[in-house]
Amino acid sequence: MTVDAHHGDLMDRVYRHQRHFYDATRKYYLLGRDQLIAALAPPRNGTVLEIGCGTGRNLLSVRRRYPQARLFGLDISEAMLETARAQSRGLDITYAKADAAAFDPQQLFGVEKFDRIFISYALSMIPPWQAVLLEASRMLAPGGELHVVDFGQQERLPRLFRSSLRRWLGWFHVTPRADLRQRLEEVARAQGASVQFMALKGGYAWLFAVRKPHLT
């Protein structure tokens, strides 16, 4: 397992204090997270991994909605994981610190493949985000699904809004990925998977579901 120490230190600096009020503020502009969770629908006793789990807010929602699922969370920020573990105490959610672009799920979690993997507003903060998509797709079990929500290109919103949003996101080291849809479609084709895409609120956010076929 290789952890990008520089990026991990950066995320710790960014969220060392923000983590204490992160969930209270992000609910107003991280759109589509609950829609993604509602679409997960893992099989009974299925394995669910969140890449870039942050404070654990999403996995707590998954636990409430799918109580029989086996849940795992991965993040590069120890500060965020500290909050996630505290908030999830007693709820049987396993967390680990690792580089999302290069980790061994068997070593970290004792799981080789996952029934569901989801990434919520993390790819826009991970420099090697394309490598993360490749790794996630390889870790899907047959019939597994990769769900992604992140900032879109605000393609149907006013130009002033787009420029103001990009400037503000830059303060937090967030970069919306213009070719996210193209890369996900390429990853899906390589796996023989299908892709469902939805633009939310004029392209403010993009929501994806990549579904890998069952073995025949």
Image (spheres, helix red, strand yellow):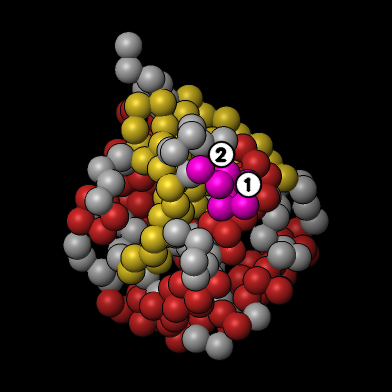
Is residue 89 shown above or below 130? below
Name the residue rendered at 25%, 69% in the picture: 3
Q: Counting other residues with Cα less than 10 Å from the Cα at mark 2, is it few (<14), some (14-19), or many (20 or more)?
A: many
Q: Is residue 175 visible?
A: no
Asked if the residue at tag 1 contacts the one at tag 2, i.e. Cβ–Cβ closer than 8 Å, the answer is yes
Image quarter in which the N terminus is found: bottom left
**Is 200 left or right of 171, judged from the image as shown?**
right
Is residue 199 shown above or below 84? above
Range drawn in magenta: 62-68
Name the residue rendered at 29%, 55% in the picture: 109
Q: Alpha-carbon distance for marks 2 and 1?
A: 10 Å
Location of residue 95 (image quadrant): bottom left
Q: Earlier in the sequence, mark 2 or mark 1?
A: 2
**Mark 2, residue position:** 40
Location of residue 161 (image quadrant): bottom right
In this view of the protein, which residue sits in the foreground, 186 or 42?
Answer: 42
Say what secondary structure mark 2 lies in: helix
Q: Position of residue 45 (x, y in %)?
A: 44, 38
| Amino acid at circle 2 | Leu
